[in-house]
Amino acid sequence: MALRALIPVLALAGLTACEAAPPKGPFAPVYEGIETRLLDGDLVQFAVKMRGARDSADVEDYAECAAAQYALIRGYGFARHLRTNVYEEGGLWHGDAVYTISAALPAGLVKLDAEVVALACAENGIPMV
């Protein structure tokens, strides 16, 4: 009978052990630059570098911001993501992204409205081209 009384207590103890770990500290990225390279007509490559990224998504966001601003500078309103490769070496994160830019909404699954993305980047303090 005493064992049955302990089961709810043991179950509750197990649940408290599953709590998420606290964050490692405030997100304080250091953006180390963007290089753009026109590959062919509307095909553009962006190489970005940053420190303090939480994961590859932060690097991908930085490249997306670069693509959005580049499209706007060139007089285009849209970009379509083709690929992004990310790796980290010695605390420095590298992103290599390729986008097409266009005046009209492009076909494809991953496309962005350059003006909307650029505004979000500015609000989040992510530098652009």
Image (spheres, helix red, strand yellow):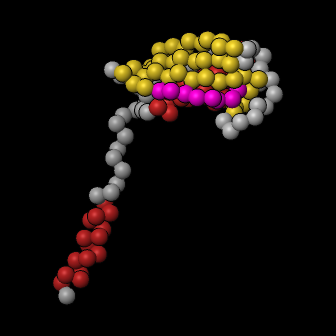
Highlighted range, magenta: 79-86
- Please identify the residue farthest to the left as the structure is shown: 2
Image spot of residue 112 (x, y percent): 69, 32
Q: Residue at x 43, y 23 (%)?
A: 93
- Please identify the residue farthest to the front as the structure is shown: 40
Q: Residue at x 43, y 33 (%)?
A: 55
Height in image: 110 above or below 91?
below
Q: Residue at x 65, y 12 (%)?
A: 38
Q: Is residue 114 magenta?
A: no
Q: Is residue 125 visible?
A: no
Chief secondary structure of the magenta portion: strand
Image spot of residue 86 (x, y percent): 47, 27
Q: Quadrant of the N terminus?
A: bottom left
Question: In the figure, is residue 84 to the left or right of 23?
Answer: right
Question: In the figure, is residue 84 to the left or right of 52?
Answer: right
Question: In the figure, is residue 8 to the left or right of 105?
Answer: left
Q: Quadrant of the C terminus?
A: top right
